Image (tube, rainbow, N blue to C red):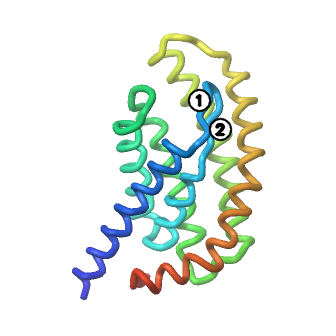
Amino acid sequence: MQKNQTVRKLALSAMLIAMQIILSRYLGIQAPFFQTSFGFVAIATASAILGPVWGAACAFIADLLGVLLAGTGAYFPLFSINEILYALLYGFFLHTDRRTPLRVVLCVIIQCAFVAIPLTPVWLFIYFKYVVGAAKAFSLIFMQKITVSLIELPIKMAVLVPLAHFVFPKLEKIVGVTRK
């Protein structure tokens, strides 16, 4: 029985990794200093259904494969840190029987306040300065990330609340994943 559940987890992980790559790399909005997508849905689903560790592994693999398959530049490992942290937070807040709207809102706010806004501008500054060779003003990158995060915040909440309430419990039953 344990082997069957591991195979199901691997199959779901592979599907969600593919979904994340398609949603973020091919269907996302890409601009020089602005990038957004619904790729978070796949990682939130992986973390909520499979747990924070599986979700973090899916986030890392999806980020790496996404750059290799459809990236516009070189792989930059610091961006993977954000994806892993997002997945861990999704798992911490949503891998539970009590997936309340409050837990979803707290998860998204904590991601925004402690991952997206403080870390992404630092990674972008390092990327542009040392990898690309074109220094961009940190304050400009920081202000853009705040603006983007404030736009994404209600969108993520509006998408994740119904998913957590309606979709995740049904998907757990379909996949047959049990929590320890």
**Marks 2 and 1, how far apart at CA:** 7 Å
Q: Quadrant of residue 76?
A: top left
Please provide percent x and percent y for residue 119.
Answer: 60, 37
Please provide percent x and percent y for residue 20.
Answer: 47, 53
49 vs 1: above or below:
above
Tag shown at residue 118: 2
Answer whether labels 2 and 1 touch (C-beta < 8 Å): yes
The quadrant of the image that shows the C terminus is: bottom left
Find the residue positioned furthest to the front.
Answer: 27
Residue carrying label 1: 122
Name which residue lies at 38% across and 69% down. 12
Mark 2 residue type = Pro
Residue in the foreground of this view, choosing between 81 and 175: 175
51 vs 156: above or below:
below
Q: Quadrant of residue 103?
A: bottom right
Name which residue lies at 63% across and 15% down. 136
**Could you tell me how many numbered marks the image carries?**
2
Mark 1 residue type = Val
Residue 93 in view? yes
